């Protein structure tokens, strides 16, 4: 099920609330059952869904006990709707402000994530995003593991008219990262994006490499690139990367596809880390800024 389906199901549940002549516990329970079923089908973690159900019930109960409905069903409906909306926002809002690049200084951003998640594509998209907003931006390719990684960076950076750095001969990713960042800092770039190796699996070697690159380039922000299409596996992947690279932001890619997306949403709660962008296609401009409230509003149409 794609996110649009989730939106439709949530809307169907909420409109059945609107049609109900009275709002009692039975109506609320049915509504919450439908909302929770839709979230579970989208791969949202079962514990988070159970928490959402409890919190909505507790909020509605407290409101009704304080007489906020003034005895009217119409008010009761808006209380229930607001409680559900707020809790859906909470699902994607860890309450942490992500780092914001500042002009006139070097902002080093390090991208981590497994191979195939869309790291290299996203690094270029990010560079384009910041470049368009007046930040002098560039990319350092510190992926020496995958054959052709530097070529991919070179091609996409050239297409995007973004400066890049990498090496065909140096095999130490830490050395390349350090050299590239030092060079671009000297040249007064505002946003320096370091693309790292992904490998296929969560291996201890990969995590060690992330720690070493992190120590060498001292990123202002590390971003985990998470593929929406991996479903519930997103949670475990995010947890493992959080331990090694302590990322401060998440970008969820491939939200345009048939991804369920709920696993990536759960990764926010598990790692208490905000999503900052969504990848919505293969092209350079297919990057959408993410904010919890507008995202849920759009989901509910
Ligand atoms: P990396 O191994 O993590 O660096 O992944 P790549 O950047 O090479 O991307 C892997 C594949 O995913 C490529 O075919 C990309 O075009 C594709 N891709 C990346 N981001 C998105 C996205 O947001 N939407 C779609 N549909 N494809 C994406």
Image: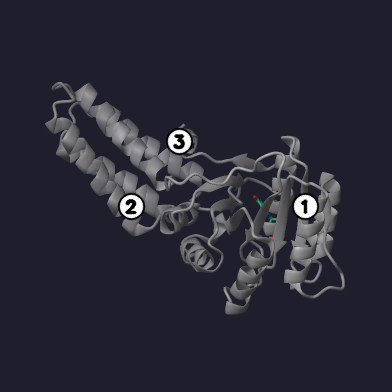
Q: Is residue 140 above or below residue 76?
A: below
How far apart marks 2 and 3 lie (CA) works out to 18 Å
Q: Which residue is mark 3?
A: 293
Q: Nearer the viewer, residue 262 or 104?
A: 104
Q: What residue appears at the point 43 percent right and 38 percent down from the top-left corner?
A: 8
Q: Residue at x 67, y 58 (%)?
A: 119
Residue 181, percent from left and from top: 76, 58
Reading the image, the residue beneath label 1 is: 185
Distance, label 1 to label 2, CA atoms, is 45 Å
Res 212 seen here: yes
Mark 3 residue crowding within 10 angstroms, few (<14) / some (14–19) / many (20+): some
Q: Which mark is residue 49?
A: 2
Residue 240 position, x and y percent, is 50, 68
- Asked whether the beta carbons under mark 1 and mark 2 sit within 8 Å of each other, the answer is no
Residue at (85% x, 47% y) in the render:
159
Figure quadrant of residue 69: top left
The disc, 3 or 1, on the residue closer to the chain's N-terminal end is: 1
Between discs 2 and 3, the one toward the N terminus = 2
Could you tell me if the residues under marks 3 and 1 are in contact, i.e. CB atoms within 8 Å? no
**Dividing the picture into quarters, in which one does residue 45 lie?**
bottom left
For residue 283, the mark is none
Q: Secondary structure at mark 3?
A: helix
Q: Is residue 75 above or below residue 122?
A: above
Query: Which quadrant of the frame does ligand 1 lie within?
Result: bottom right
Instruction: Please tell me whether residue 11 is drawn above or below residue 45 in the rendered image.
Output: above
Query: Crowdedness of circle 1 by 10 Å Cα count: few (<14), some, many (20+)?
Result: some
């Amino acid at each position: 099920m794609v996110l649009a389906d989730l939106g439709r199901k949530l809307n169907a549940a909420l409109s059945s609330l609107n049609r109900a002549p009275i709002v009692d516990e039975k109506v609320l329970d049915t509504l919450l059952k439908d909302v929770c079923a839709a979230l579970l089908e989208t791969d949202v973690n079962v514990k988070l869904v159970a928490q959402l159900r409890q919190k909505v019930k507790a909020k509605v109960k407290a409101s009704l006990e304080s007489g906020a409905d003034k005895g009217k069903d119409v008010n009761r409906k808006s209380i229930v709707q607001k409680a559900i909306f707020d809790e859906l926002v909470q699902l994607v809002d860890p309450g942490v402000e992500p780092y914001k690049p500042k002009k006139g200084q070097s902002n080093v951003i390090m991208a981590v994530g497994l191979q195939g998640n869309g790291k290299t594509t996203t690094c270029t998209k990010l560079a384009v995003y910041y470049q368009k907003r007046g930040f002098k931006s560039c990319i350092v390719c510190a992926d020496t593991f995958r054959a052709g990684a530097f070529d991919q960076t070179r091609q996409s950076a050239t297409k995007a008219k973004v400066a890049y750095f990498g090496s065909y001969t140096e095999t130490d990713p830490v050395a390349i990262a350090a050299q590239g960042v030092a060079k671009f800092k000297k040249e007064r770039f505002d946003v320096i994006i370091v693309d790292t190796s992904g490998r296929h699996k969560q291996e201890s070697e990969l995590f060690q490499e992330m720690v070493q690159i992190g120590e060498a380039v001292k990123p202002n922000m590390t971003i985990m690139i998470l593929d929406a299409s991996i479903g519930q596996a997103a949670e475990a992947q995010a947890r493992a990367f959080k331990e090694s690279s302590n990322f401060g932001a998440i970008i969820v890619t491939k939200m345009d596809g048939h991804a369920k997306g709920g696993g990536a949403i759960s990764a926010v709660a598990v790692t208490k880390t905000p999503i900052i962008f969504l990848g919505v296609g293969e092209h350079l401009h297919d990057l959408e800024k993410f904010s919890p409230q507008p995202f849920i509003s759009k989901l509910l149409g």
